[in-house]
Amino acid sequence: MSKERIAISPDLYDIMPLDYQDLVNHATYGKEDRGWKDIGTSKELIEQHSLCAGCPESMAFRYVLAALPNPEDTVMVGSTGCTSLVFPHVAIHNIHSLFGNQNAVASGLKRALTVRFPNRIKDVVVLAGDGATVDIGLDMTLQAWFRQEKFTTICFDNELYANTGGQESGLMQKGFVAKMAPVGKLFDKVRLPEIARESGCHYIVNCTVSKPSVVEKVIRNAVLIAREIGPTYVQLYTPCILEIGKDSMEGLQEMRDSEKPNERFAFKEYVSEPAKALLADLAAKTKEKKAAAKAAVLQEA
């Protein structure tokens, strides 16, 4: 990683906005061990957002951005929803697609980038809500997985349509009553992680965003596996606290309650055999690199 993409010409530095100067001076681009701990000190990890106060999606978005292994060469594809209010604040290339066609857009984009930059790593990451992923866009979600497109799909699962008044979605819990679903959900929550496995995804995780270190590891694994092997899917519980009748400070506790053993968002992970081999190889290289760095320090001492 490097800061070359956002560097300011010395002749123009003094007239550049202070916000941009701050972005360049404190960006995590070029920092090999960048991660969630950089949130709060780096402007590109969403210093401000336009979501509701206490929204778990704002937490999730920051963790996702901090976890990207190759941010300056990553393109994120979003869809209509609350996330589309955040993307304008994101210092990473992104595309706003129509509601539901994000995986189709990502498929064409990934293929085009592979042809245009054959000797350069270009990661594509889809980020959309449950309505775009499992309802309106389900066909395009599945077809991308069937074709083994090499990108990651992240679903911010609100368990309802949070952006348009609280209608039920396929991922809503059975029996849940929302403002625009007054009789309650009549069928079970769609088991999209299981469908993803049957559809050929090589890495699948179902969890909340209550633990930033977990989200960081999951997203990084998903992107690295998608880059080398095939499609990956991450389903993150990001409850709309307003639509489920919670106060702005109760989002974190809602997620913690939902991730307890036997609850619907208890941590679940699937890793295909090729993906296991890749992760083991990456772990071995990381261990070897750390050992070499330690040996170098000891030699200097």
Image (spheres, helix red, strand yellow):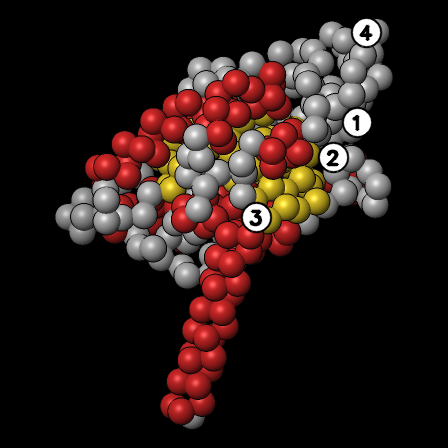
N-terminal of the pair, mark 4 or mark 1, is 4
Disc 3 target residue = 272
Nearer to me, 153 or 79: 153
Please tell me which of labels 3 and 1 falls first in the chain. 1
Q: Amino acid at mark 2?
A: Gly
User: Which amino acid lies under the numbered mark 1 shown in the image of this protein?
Assistant: Lys
Q: How crowded is the residue under tag 2: few (<14 C-alpha within 10 Å), some, or many (20+)?
A: many
User: Where, by quadrant of the figure, is residue 176 drawn?
Assistant: top right
CA–CA distance between discs 4 and 1? Answer: 18 Å
Residue 28, horizontal then vertical, whole percent: 41, 53
Q: Secondary structure at mark 2?
A: helix
For residue 269, say whether it is visible: yes
Which numbered circle lies on residue 246?
Answer: 1
Report the residue marked by disc 2.
Answer: 251
Q: Residues within 10 Å of mark 4 (few under 14, many from 20)?
A: few
Residue drawn 45% across the image and 89% down it: 298
Look at the numbered discs 2 and 1 and tell me whether their residues touch, using CB distance below 8 Å. yes
Q: Image quadrant for the C terminus?
A: bottom left
| Front label number (4 vs 1) | 4
Q: Which image quadrant: the N terminus?
A: bottom left
Residue 127, compared with residue 188, is above or below; it is below
Residue at position x 70%, y 44% in the image: 268
The image shows residue 191, relative to residue 272, as above or below, that is: above
Q: Earlier in the sequence, mark 2 or mark 4?
A: 4
Q: Residue at x 47, y 79 (%)?
A: 291
Residue drawn at 42 percent across, 39 percent down: 150
Q: CA distance from mark 4 to mark 3?
A: 41 Å
Residue 181 position in % (x across, y down): 77, 9
